[in-house]
Amino acid sequence: MVAVYRIPPYFDKPIRLVVENGRITKIEGGDEAESLRRFLVTMSKYVGEEAVYYFHGLHFGVHPQASVEPHQCPNALYRRLIDHCHTSNVHIHIGDTAHIPGYPYFLHITGDIRTATFKVGDTLIHDRGHLMALDSPEVKAVAAKYPGRPGL
């Protein structure tokens, strides 16, 4: 029997991933976290735990004005690409099966996190979706050089 897990494209409740040394060591949250946890357990049977819990990396947007409404851009995929570049967006990658012999698929789970609070050690990078680098005096000085353009 094949297990079927429904992981919604948008989560209603927060999920917390604890990542240590490039591996997901804990998944916390409600029903959606449990669905993700069950999915990863099932996939580990096919690709192994090393590959399925690999936290491939993350990146985030750097453009504070990267946002368009459906009436401005009717193409949903292109809108998503633009939103992906907004400073409030943190994009994560989970899984790695590039070197799994006998498994013909590439396990690559991605997620966009909006309004994330993200820390590296004690350094706050995002605070509820606000990219902290935007508060830097150096960044504000560069933005001030272009008063006719959208600002921070």
Image (spheres, rainbow, N blue to C red):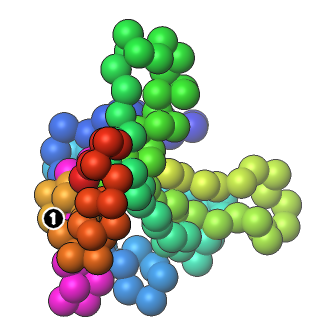
The percent coordinates of residue 30 (x first, y second) are: 17, 50
- Amino acid on which the number 1 mark rests in the picture: Asp
Of residues 59 and 64, the one nearer the viewer is 64
Q: Which residue does the image show at 26% across and 60% down from the upper left?
A: 144
Regarding residue 7, the answer to whether it shows in the image is no
Residue 67 magenta: no
Q: Which residue does the image show at 50% across and 51% down from the upper left?
A: 110
The magenta segment is 114-126
The percent coordinates of residue 29 (x first, y second) are: 18, 56
The percent coordinates of residue 9 (x first, y second) are: 38, 34
Q: Main secondary structure of the magenta part?
A: strand
Of residues 87 and 91, the one nearer the viewer is 87
Q: If the image is split into quadrants, where does the N terminus sit?
A: top right
Regarding residue 130, the answer to whether it shows in the image is yes
The percent coordinates of residue 82 (x first, y second) are: 47, 37
Q: Which residue does the image show at 39% across and 40% down from the upper left?
A: 66
Above-or-below relation of 124 to 17: below
Question: In the orientation shown, which residue stands out farthest toward the right?
Answer: 102
Mark 1 Cα-neighbour bin, 10 Å: few <14, some 14–19, many ≥20: some
In this rendering, would 19 be left or right of 48? left
Above-or-below relation of 49 to 67: below
Q: Which residue does the image show at 35% across and 34% down from the upper left?
A: 67
In this rendering, would 78 be left or right of 5? right
- Secondary structure state at the residue bearing disc 1: strand
In this rendering, would 113 be left or right of 44? left
Of residues 119 and 149, the one nearer the viewer is 149
Residue marked by disc 1: 127
